[in-house]
Amino acid sequence: MSSDVIGASGLAGRYATALFELAETDKQLDQVADDMAKIQSMLEVSDDLNRLIRSPVVSRIDQSKGMTAVLESAEIGVLTKNFIGVVADNRRLFALPGMLKGFQALLADHRGETTAEVVSAKALSDAQMKALGESLKKATGSNVTIDAEVDEELLGGLIVKVGSLMVDSSLRTKLTKLRFAMKGMG
């Protein structure tokens, strides 16, 4: 997680906080959360959209027009469209991924949820995600949203981060520890 998202600080955090406060005031948190999830998934699958928001070569007007077209075709709500419009006008679209994560973190905190970052060697099944979620809920005492990633270099096992706590049960780490232990014995 980048430093500009943690605790809603930095540029992305300030924008995320502003959007969260607007959505809360207008009682549109659920709508904006859905909109932000749609935008997040579009960014995950579209290289062209990522180029649009990150390229310094694309003019402010072209970025704004492009984002407006994308948001309208995705049927994004008015508040979110207006917010993205301000972000584009201020030439801050490059920070949009951080704003999305910041908003999600603020929403989770508001709902009393904790976010766990889980890295696994292969994608977890729905049953595994459910079991992991239940285990984390017991351990933390609150609802847990899982942000799952895949890193095939782990070989097996999981790395789970909840707040400042990290549990690394990956096979890669265990093999590394074993290698160091064997070097110490010889």
Image (cartoon, rainbow, N blue to C red):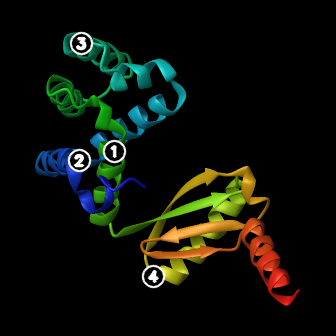
Q: Position of residue 168 (x, y in %)?
A: 64, 73
Q: Where is 106 relative to 14, above or below?
A: below
- Label 2–label 1 contact, CB within 8 A: yes
Relative to 46, 130 lies left or right: right
Determine the residue located farthest toward the bottom in the rendered image.
185
Inspect the image, locate mark 3, and give the three-letter code of the amino acid beneath it.
Answer: Ser
Q: Nearer the viewer, mark 2 or mark 1?
A: 1
- Sequence-wise, the earlier of marks 4 and 3 is 3
Which callout, 3 or 1, points at the residue further toward the start of the chain? 3
* Residue plotted at (28% across, 58% down): 106
* Label 4 residue SS: loop
Q: CA distance from mark 4 to mark 3?
A: 48 Å
**Mark 4 near mark 3, Cβ–Cβ under 8 Å?**
no
Residue under pointer 3? 59
Q: Earlier in the sequence, mark 2 or mark 3?
A: 2
Give the alpha-carbon distance from disc 2 to disc 3, as whole Å. Answer: 23 Å
Residue at (31% x, 32% y) in the render: 94
Q: Is residue 150 above or below residue 34?
A: below
- Decide: marks 2, 3 in contact (CB < 8 A)? no
What residue would you read off at disc 4? 141
- Answer with left or right where residue 88 lies relative to residue 102: left
Q: Is residue 134 above or below residue 84?
A: below
Residue 181: percent from left, percent from top? 80, 84
Q: Nearer the viewer, mark 2 or mark 3?
A: 3
Q: Callout 2: helix, strand or loop?
A: helix
Quadrant position of the N terminus in the picture = bottom left
Q: Amino acid at mark 2?
A: Ala
Residue mark closest to the camera, 3 vs 1: 3
The quarter of the picture where residue 132 lies is bottom right
